[in-house]
Image (cartoon, grey):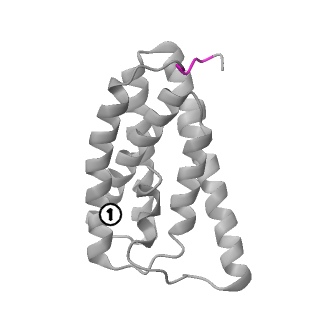
Amino acid sequence: MWILATGNIWDGVAPSYQGTSLATAMISMIIVGLVEEMIFRGFLFRAMLSKNKAVVAIIVSAVTFGIGHIVNLFTGQGSFETVMQIIFAISWGFILTMVCYKSGSIIPCIIAHSMIDALSLFGADNELVDWIYIGVTIVTAIVYCTYLGKLKSDKVLLATN
């Protein structure tokens, strides 16, 4: 998960901002990661887990997180790119939700999500590498979540936590 979280800089480093603008953008991205994790893993996932089977809570949390990225259509992003971003976000949604479920903690999810968002400010934007990152993320989500799903866990996230 940690290596995958660096995917935004696999194509090199070329900061989008400089100076205080970069610092402000980084703080914003870290806050976005924190807030989104609180909403999707902290509130939605935990609330659903207390009322539904874990598999339902995991699917709804991951898919809802991904679909939330549809707002990028309103920023002028193309339809195909938005659909691919939604699939990418759903993949990350599954990874983060499974980590939260199996570890019993939202902290690694907040750190990983904030890291992904903050590093997006530094990527050099090589289209081929971006597509590779999306593909690797999808495959990793399938393999990693299958692996995590088979692990027996001493820590099971409870709604009372």
Give me the residue at 44% from left, 65% from top: 74
Q: Position of residue 89 (x, y in %)?
A: 39, 51
Q: In this view, does 50 lie to the left or right of 78?
A: right
Q: Main secondary structure of the magenta part?
A: loop
* Residue drawn where x is 66% and y is 63% of the image: 28
Residue 114 is situated, as x and y percent measured from the top left of the image, at 58, 56
| Residue at x 39%, y 39% (from the top left corner) | 94
Up-down relation of residue 120 to residue 90 (above or below): below
Query: Magenta region: which residues?
Result: 155-159
Quadrant assignment, res 85: bottom left
The quarter of the rendered structure image containing the C terminus is top right
Q: Name the residue under label 1.
A: 133
| Mark 1 element type | helix
Residue 73 included in the magenta stretch of the image: no
Task: Indicate the position of residue 123 as horizontal and vertical percent values.
Answer: 46, 76
Left or right? Give the position of 8 relative to 18: left
